[in-house]
Amino acid sequence: MRESDRSVRPTVRFDAARLVGRVRDWGRGLGFDAVGISGVDLSRAEPGLRAWLEAGFHGEMSYMARYGPARARPGELVPGTVSVISARMNYLASPVDEALGVLGDPASAYVSRYALGRDYHKVLRGRLQKLADRIAGEIGPFGYRVFTDSAPVLEVELATRAGLGWRGKHTLLLGRDAGSWFFLGEIFTDLPLPADEAVSEHCGSCTRCLEVCPTRAIVAPYRLDARRCISYLTIEHPGSIPDDLRPLMGNRVYGCDDCQLHCPWNKYAQVSEVGDFRVRNGLDSASLVDLFAWTEAEFDSRMQGSAIRRIGFERWSRNLAVALGNAPTAPDVVRALEARRDDVSAIVREHVEWALARHGQA
């Protein structure tokens, strides 16, 4: 990701309101479904962030505590920032009914829908960079930095202030016309741009996301304990998964979408037209047994360009072992687990033994 010299100011006078209109048009041309502008005063979000960290809800994601209040201060994170351009891109590759079907089949592996295609970090970052290049082509060099879930950015807070939606009770951004099946990305810039108006929230009295969370990780509206969240456990958590949470994970091997699958607003979600998000390696309905038979070399090869590759083969195998422990007892399930009883990883061996015990093979 290139970043311009922050000491360089545009050499051409420009109409900020007109530029924002063009940015929206360019964004749509690059595959973004909505683009909004916000300021950088996030001081109202700081108390909630501080309380969340003090409660330890970030688990072992130490980088969140390390950056602390800086996450709510864009001008400190990138000095000189006065405006943030937030962009939204749909990623849903197939209808929600298909995802529910996989969740209902305990022999299949459920992979969070956002990770079925190409790594979104690469997709969004490249397109945001092209958007920044278009701006520079219009007004000359300017100061900016592109983010795609790649730094301690309060992206939902920024997107809310940019009018792209509101924060749902599951803590994700919700849009009336798009639900929540989308990625967010930002361009921090030193351009003084007119901010959009925030939209009001429309969750009302609905608590469906709290009720369907498999591990009750959404401990209160707008409050998530990551330590219980299946997305955290399968992706961010490096060690042994707590015994009491393993049975609740079902067949979810990478991430969890339950709060989105059952959110009423997602009836308005649109299937993405971005080719990069099309399903790879049949991961939308793959067999647990088949995936567990992959070698590390196969994992590295098949997951090239996928967000899943970031967790590594050990965590991937750990997650599959838990899902196999939750699957119905069957000869192929037991054989798959026994084949890796002596795995080189102590963590994998531990979860394999737990799974075998669930099938009466301790």
Image (cartoon, rainbow, N blue to C red):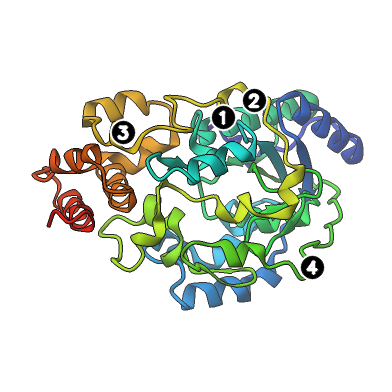
Label 1 and label 4: CA atoms lie apart by 34 Å
Residue 345 in percent (x, y) is at: 15, 47
Ranked by sequence position, the earlier of labels 3 and 2 is 2
Query: Within the image, what quadrant is residue 308 found in?
Result: top left
Where is residue 55? Give x, y as percent. 47, 78
**Mark found first going from the N terminus, 2 or 1:** 1
- Crowd band around label 1 with a 10 angstrom C-alpha radius: few (<14), some (14–19), many (20+): some
**Mark carried by residue 204:** 4
Tell me if label 3 and label 2 are in contact, CB under 8 Å.
Answer: no
Which numbered disc, 1 or 4, marks the residue that appears first in the sequence?
1
Q: Which residue is mark 2?
A: 274
| Identity, as a three-letter code, of the amino acid under mark 2 | Val
What percent of the width, then of the height, locates residue 73?
62, 62
Q: Are marks 1 and 3 in contact (CB under 8 Å)?
A: no
- Whether residue 355 sits left or right of residue 345 in the image: it is right
> Foreground mark, 2 or 1?
2
